[in-house]
Image (cartoon, rainbow, N blue to C red):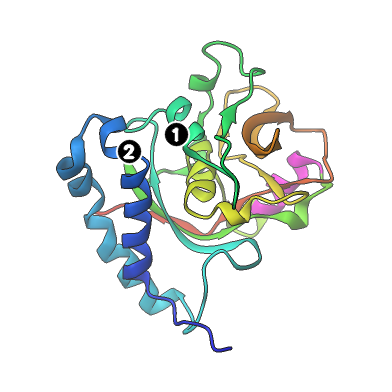
Amino acid sequence: MARTPFDAGAEFDRQVRVLTDLGYPELSGLGPERFGALVAPLRARAMAAQESRYEPGAGAGDEGRVPFLLVVSRNVAPIEETMPRTVLHGGRLPGFVDRTFEPGSLERFVATEETLLPDPDAYLLFDIERGEEFCGVVPRDAMKAIAGRDRTLLTIEEGIALVTHFPQVLVKNKCFSLGGSRCGDRRVPAIWISQKAPKLGWCWEGNPHTWLGMASAGTRTGGVA
C-alpha cells in the first residue's frame, strides 16, 4: 500500500488541535485566541522545513522517529498539569509524575546550557529519535555519543510533547531518557511505562536499563527569524 505523502502544514494543524482538545489554552491562562497567536508563527517554520528536510512519503512516528514536534514550555503549561494529559497508545489511564521527585525538585530540572532553547514559551523540535539504540547503555555514555553526533538531548517538556502528539512512540522496552533537563546532580529524567500509563521519573546517569534509551533531536527553531 502506498504511503500518504507527509504534509507538514496538516501535521502542524493536527498538533495544535491535540493541544487545544487537551485544554492547553485554558491551562495556560491564555484562552483560545491568544494561545493560537502564540503558536501560529511556527506553522510557517514547519512548512519551510518540509522543503529541505522531509522526503516525499515520509511518515510520522515510524520506528520511533518523528519529523517535528510543537513544544509548549512549562512557562505556558506546568509539567504537573501536562504530564497527566498524556496516555499510552490505545490507553486511557493518565500519565503521572513519579513521587521520587521530592517537593520542589521538578522545578530545578531545567534545560541545560547546551540545549539552547530558541524561545521560552513555544517552539519546534525537528528530527526526533526515541533512541532505543541506547537501551542498556550507561546514560552518561549515551549522552556523550549523542553530543558527538551533533544532536541535542530532549528536555522534559519535549519528552512530554513527544508522548502527547505521538503516544505510539512510548512502548514496552523502548522508553527514553531526557538528558536535556538536569538539576545539577546525577539524576537524568526519563519517561517510561508504569501502571499502564506514562510516567515521568528519573534514573542515575551511571545506571543502565535495558528498557530505557536516550531521546535526541536534530534542531530547534522559534517562530521569529
Regarding residue 225, the answer to whether it shows in the image is no
Closer-to-camera residue (147/88) = 88
Image height check: is 203 above or below 62?
above
Residue wearing tag 2 = 24
Closer-to-camera residue (218/8) = 8
Q: Residues within 10 Å of mark 1 (few under 14, many from 20)?
A: many
Q: Position of residue 46 (x, y in %)?
A: 34, 65
Q: Position of residue 9 (x, y in %)?
A: 31, 69
Q: Position of residue 165 (x, y in %)?
A: 47, 53
**Please, what is the three-letter code of the amino acid marked with disc 1?**
Thr
Q: Which residues are magenta?
A: 138-146
Q: Residues within 10 Å of mark 2 (few under 14, many from 20)?
A: many
Closer-to-camera residue (32/64) = 32
Q: Regarding mark 2 in the picture, which secondary structure is present there?
A: helix
| Mark 2 or 1, nearer chain start | 2
Residue wearing tag 1 = 82
State the residue at coordinates (78%, 49%): 173
| Magenta part, dominant SS | helix
- Is residue 141 in the magenta section? yes
| In this picture, residue 154 sits left or right of residue 64 | left
Image height check: is 17 above or below 190?
below
